[in-house]
Image (cartoon, grey):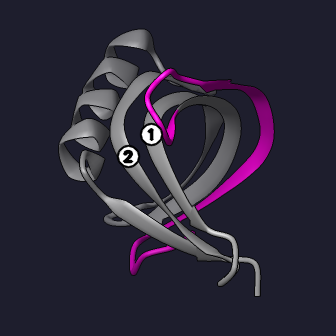
Amino acid sequence: GSTDNTTLTFTALHKLTMLPQPGKVVADFEMEGSRKGLMFNKFSGRACADVEVWVAPEELTGVVKINKITELKLDHTLGLVEGIIKGLVNAKMKGEEIRFSWK
């Protein structure tokens, strides 16, 4: 996925846990990406997110709603900085809905 300033690619799924509530999932994945700002930064690491997924199989589409980033480990980043970034990501991404399509 991408925005005007950020590009993010999920490179590997480590764990996908279906929760008792319909559509609720916890996903643990590897990611890499880049962010344009004052400086152009590349990043990679591992994240775990609590999400809800709705799929319309007849239309080959769906929606992922991000409830919370529960864990974030960025390569070559200090733990304190990771905590700050995790808080910023949660504030920005909480409740975001990402639409996808297999068409």
Q: Residue at x 45, y 39 (%)?
A: 51
Going from N to C along the chain, the mark reached first, 2 or 1, is 1
Give coordinates of residue 52: x percent, y percent. Answer: 44, 44
Q: Residues within 10 Å of mark 2 (few under 14, many from 20)?
A: some
Q: Is residue 9 left or right of residue 85?
A: right
Q: Residue at x 26, y 38 (%)?
A: 90
Circle 1 SS class: strand
Q: Residues within 10 Å of mark 1 (few under 14, many from 20)?
A: many
Instruction: Examine the structure image and report whether residue 33 is included in the region drawn in magenta.
Output: no
Q: Is residue 76 visible?
A: no
**Image-quadrant location for residue 29:** top right
Question: Alpha carbon of mark 2 to alpha carbon of mark 1: how far?
Answer: 5 Å
Labels 2 & 1 near each other (Cβ < 8 A): yes
Instruction: Examine the structure image and report whether residue 21 is included in the region drawn in magenta.
Output: yes
Circle 2 SS class: strand
**Image-quadrant location for residue 13:** top right
Give coordinates of residue 27: x percent, y percent. Answer: 61, 31
The C terminus sits in image quarter: bottom right
Q: Disc 1 designates what residue?
A: 51
Q: Disc 2 designates what residue?
A: 66
- Amino acid tagged 1: Val
Q: Which of the pair 67/40 is nearer the observer?
A: 67
Q: Is residue 38 left or right of residue 75?
A: left
Instruction: Give the residues in magenta.
Output: 1-24
Give coordinates of residue 25: x percent, y percent. Answer: 54, 33
Q: Which of the pair 1/67 is nearer the observer?
A: 67
Is 7 situated above or below 65? below
The N terminus sits in image quarter: bottom right
- Amino acid tagged 2: Ile
Q: Which of the pair 18/79 is nearer the observer?
A: 18
